């Protein structure tokens, strides 16, 4: 083989080298493009996961807000119910209000606790266990509701 190359051969070598470099550059570009596409797909998947998590967090916070509001309303209702029961179960001074005619109630005279009833026609409280024995209580309280056992009022 000769050590001297013709101008045409040199141009051919240069063209081949240039074409090889372009081919290598094209392969490198294609590798980078594939890597970019793969990374882009990974990022799109992660974005979709994060969006789903954000949606779940939003739904949970909306659910929590509804639950909180529902609990607040229920607590308010229970407080009102409790205040009604507390008002029913407090000692009422006879100077404030009298029980209904004949209604059996708890009576307190400052020393003794017992049950009795108020008679409107006589304007007096009577001892439940000793009929027609007047007593002079300072306070009275309605009796609690009887217990309910198996859907009916307990008679024991």
Image: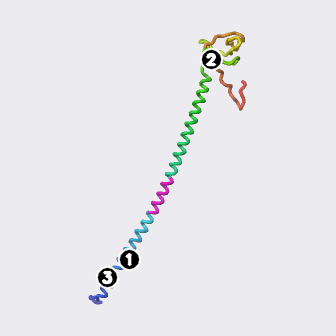
Residue at the image position 67 percent from the left and 16 percent from the top = 115
Q: Eyeballing the image, is 126 above or below 89?
A: above
Residue at the image position 64 percent from the left and 15 percent from the top = 107
Query: Of tags 3 and 2, which is closer to the observer?
Result: 2
In-image side of 18 versus 104 (left or right): left
- The prevailing secondary structure element of the residues shown in magenta is helix
Q: Which mark is residue 14?
A: 3
Scheme of image coloration: rainbow
**Quarter of the figure that contains the C terminus:** top right
**Could you tell me how far apart the alpha carbons at marks 3 and 1 are, in whole angstroms?**
14 Å
Q: Eyeballing the image, is 133 above or below 143?
A: above
Residue 26 occupies quadrant? bottom left
Neighbour class for label 1 at 10 Å: few (<14), some, many (≥20)? few
> In the rendered structure, which disc, 3 or 1, sits on the residue that comes first in sequence?
3
| Front residue (pair 95, 155) | 95
Magenta region includes residue 45: yes
Percent across and percent down for residue 117 are 68, 16
> In the rendered structure, which disc, 1 or 2, sits on the residue that comes first in sequence?
1
| Front residue (pair 101, 129) | 101
CB under 8 Å between discs 3 and 2: no
Q: Which mark is residue 23?
A: 1
Percent across and percent down for residue 127 are 68, 13
Q: What span is colored magenta in the figure?
A: 40-52
Dot 2 corresponds to which residue?
A: 97
**Could you tell me how far apart the alpha carbons at marks 1 and 2 are, in whole angstroms?**
106 Å
Residue at the image position 31 percent from the left and 85 percent from the top = 11
In-image side of 8 versus 91 (left or right): left
Percent across and percent down for residue 42 are 46, 61
Is label 2 in a helix, a strand or a loop?
loop
In-image side of 145 versus 3 (left or right): right
Magenta region includes residue 149: no
> In the rendered structure, which disc, 3 or 2, sits on the residue that comes first in sequence?
3
């Amino acid at each position: 083989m000769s050590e001297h190359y013709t101008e045409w051969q040199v141009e051919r070598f240069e063209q081949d080298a240039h074409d090889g470099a372009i081919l290598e550059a094209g392969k490198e570009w294609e590798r980078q493009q594939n890597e970019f596409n793969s990374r882009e797909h990974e990022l799109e998947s992660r974005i979709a996961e994060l969006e789903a998590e954000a949606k779940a967090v939003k739904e949970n916070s909306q659910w929590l807000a509804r639950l909180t509001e529902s609990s607040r309303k229920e607590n308010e209702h229970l407080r009102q119910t409790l205040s009604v029961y507390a008002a029913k179960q407090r000692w009422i001074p006879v100077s404030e209000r009298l029980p209904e005619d004949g209604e059996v109630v708890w009576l307190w005279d400052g020393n003794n606790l017992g049950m009795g009833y108020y008679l409107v026609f006589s304007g007096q409280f009577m001892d439940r266990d000793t009929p027609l024995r007047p007593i002079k209580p300072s306070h009275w309280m309605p009796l609690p509701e009887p217990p309910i056992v198996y859907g009916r009022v307990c008679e024991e």
